[in-house]
């Protein structure tokens, strides 16, 4: 049986897939610039970023910003068996490799292992976000597990406006994000549901 959640995931991925490339590039640049300004204002440096796949918001400008300021870029490495994320910090693109799901990830042999307690914020990719701050991903539950173990972390979702919807059919294990950044808005979700 196909669930509402699976249908929504397919529909929202479809919406994202048909966004023109030029639109996605422009929106990604706007979101990246807003994120850089936010991180500077709050003096946040130890940030878990992500390297984009499919048509996700592309934050590589933020990675470039970190590297050009002699800061490390922290990225997740996905363990496909355990469905868990481990964080590694890299100093340049040479420390990256193609990992699970074809995602560009830190090479654990070259990168520095980062304890999640060191993190000051987590930038969360998603397929869709709803008005209560719940997120829909690719269905692996990686970020849900990560936030269940590290509930204190500030989580910042990033999205094109076309990824927002009224409900993503959140389940008991789903965690809300703290902030959502779009090309034109910064939304705070104050209530932890
Ligand atoms: N850029 C990025 N990195 C990330 C995530 C993410 O959502 N985006 N993750 C967040 O969880 C973790 C990896 N999880 C992922 C789970 C599935 C797919 C994916 O593309 N799945 C294919 C099906 C592949 C298969 O079945 O073998 C697909 O949905 O088309 C990608 C990432 C950690 N790193
Ligand atoms: N904290 C958890 N502990 C154990 N299993 C979990 C936990 N969180 C989620 N799961 C499991 O993970 C699966 C996928 O969850 P969900 O559909 O919410 O993923 P998602 O948020 O879309 O994916 P992702 O975070 O990887 O982008 C579900 O079957 C759920 O049972």
Image (cartoon, rainbow, N blue to C red):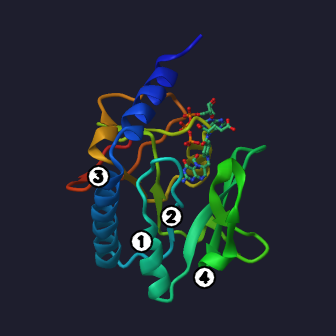
Residue 23, disc: 3
Q: Is residue 170 visible?
A: no
Q: Which residue is mark 4?
A: 91
Q: Secondary structure at mark 1?
A: helix
Q: Quadrant of the C terminus?
A: top left
Residue appearing at x 60%, y 81% in the figure: 92
Residue 22 in sight here: yes
Which of the labelled discs sits on residue 49, or is there none?
A: 2
Residue pointed to by mark 1: 62
- x 60%, y 39%: residue: 141
Say which label, 2 or 1, has the lower sequence index: 2
Of residue 12 and residue 116, the one placed in the foreground of this image is 12
Position of 18 compared to 124: left or right?
Answer: left
Ligand 1 has an atom within 8 Å of the beta carbon of the residue at disc 2 = no
Q: Secondary structure at mark 2?
A: loop
Does label 4 or label 3 sit earlier along the sequence? 3
Closer to the chain start, of discs 4 and 2, is 2
Q: Residue at x 37, y 53 (%)?
A: 158
Mark closer to the observer (4, 3): 3
- Which quarter of the figure has residue 191? top left
Q: Which of the two discs, 4 and 1, labels the residue nearer the N terminus?
A: 1
The image shows residue 13 at horizontal and vertical percentages of 44, 35
x, y percentage for residue 157? 39, 52
The earlier-in-sequence mark between 3 and 1 is 3
Label 3 and label 2: CA atoms lie apart by 22 Å
Proximity of marks 2 and 1: CB atoms separated by less than 8 Å = yes
């Amino acid at each position: 049986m196909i669930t509402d959640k699976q249908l929504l995931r397919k529909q929202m991925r479809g919406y994202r897939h048909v966004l023109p490339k030029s639109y996605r590039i422009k929106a990604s640049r706007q979101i990246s610039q807003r994120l850089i300004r936010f991180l500077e204002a709050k003096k946040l440096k130890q940030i878990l970023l992500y390297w984009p796949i499919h048509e996700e918001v592309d934050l590589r400008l933020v990675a470039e910003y970190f590297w050009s300021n002699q800061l490390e870029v922290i990225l997740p490495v996905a363990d496909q068996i355990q469905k868990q994320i481990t964080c590694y910090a890299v100093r340049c693109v040479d420390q990256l490799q193609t990992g699970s799901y074809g995602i560009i990830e830190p090479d654990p042999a070259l990168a520095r292992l980062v304890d999640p307690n060191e993190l000051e914020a987590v930038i969360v990719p998603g397929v869709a976000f709803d008005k209560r701050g719940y997120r829909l991903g690719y269905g692996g539950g990686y970020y849900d597990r990560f936030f269940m173990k590290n509930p204190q972390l500030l989580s910042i979702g990033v999205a094109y406006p076309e990824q927002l919807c009224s409900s993503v059919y959140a389940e008991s294990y789903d965690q809300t994000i703290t902030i959502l950044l779009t090309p034109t808005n910064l939304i705070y979700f104050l209530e932890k549901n």
